Image (tube, rainbow, N blue to C red):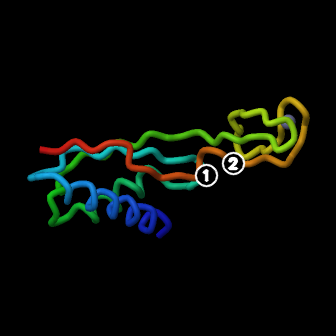
Amino acid sequence: MHEMSLMGGVFEVIEKTISQYKVSRVLQVRLKVGELTNAEPDALQMVFEAFCKDTICEGAELIVERVPVRGRCRNCQLEFTVPTMFFLCPKCQNTSIEVIQGEELLLESLEVE
Ligand SMILES: [Zn+2]
């Protein structure tokens, strides 16, 4: 499952972060999920719970914030939100668009006890 490897990366960051502090329990995990990751919220939730099981994250709440895709035109440098995978500059009609946001799955914040 695609979400499995994405979440694996997130948990590496979580473990690294909590190992630096005295944490007894993780209460809430907030993620930023780019539209281009194609991660299904339901699948993310399921995989999240699987990763949390028998760790200090067990029972933590998962909050997923969707991040829209943004691109930058290689011709006129315009930055814009890309609607439904339609990579076309609204200003100069160029189709050479660099993705600057939307491919990421990031740990936004962690609430711990
Ligand atoms: Zn352009």
Relative to the observer, which residue lies in front, 93 or 43? Answer: 93
Residue 38 in percent (x, y) is at: 56, 55
Report the number of discs: 2
Left or right: residue 57 compared with residue 105: left
For image coordinates 21% across by 55% down, the residue present is 18
Q: Which mark is residue 27?
A: none
Cα distance between the residues tagged 2 and 1: 10 Å
Q: Which residue is mark 2?
A: 99
Question: Callout 1, which amino acid?
Answer: Leu
> Label 1: few (<14), some or many (≥20) within 10 Å?
some
Above-or-below relation of 110 to 15: above
Left or right: residue 67 compared with residue 82: left
> Label 2: few (<14), some or many (≥20) within 10 Å?
some
Residue 82 in percent (x, y) is at: 71, 39
Q: Residue furthest top?
A: 91
Question: Callout 2, which amino acid?
Answer: Val
Corner quadrant of residue 11 = bottom left
For image coordinates 58% across by 52% down, the residue present is 103
Corner quadrant of residue 109 = top left
Relative to the observer, which residue lies in front, 28 or 19? Answer: 19
Question: Which quarter of the image is occupied by the C terminus?
Answer: top left
Q: Which residue is mark 1?
A: 36
- Image marks 2 and 1: residues in contact by CB distance under 8 Å: yes
For image coordinates 18% across by 49% down, the residue present is 26
Residue 107 in percent (x, y) is at: 38, 49
Which callout, 2 or 1, points at the residue further toward the start of the chain?
1
Above-or-below relation of 51 to 71: below
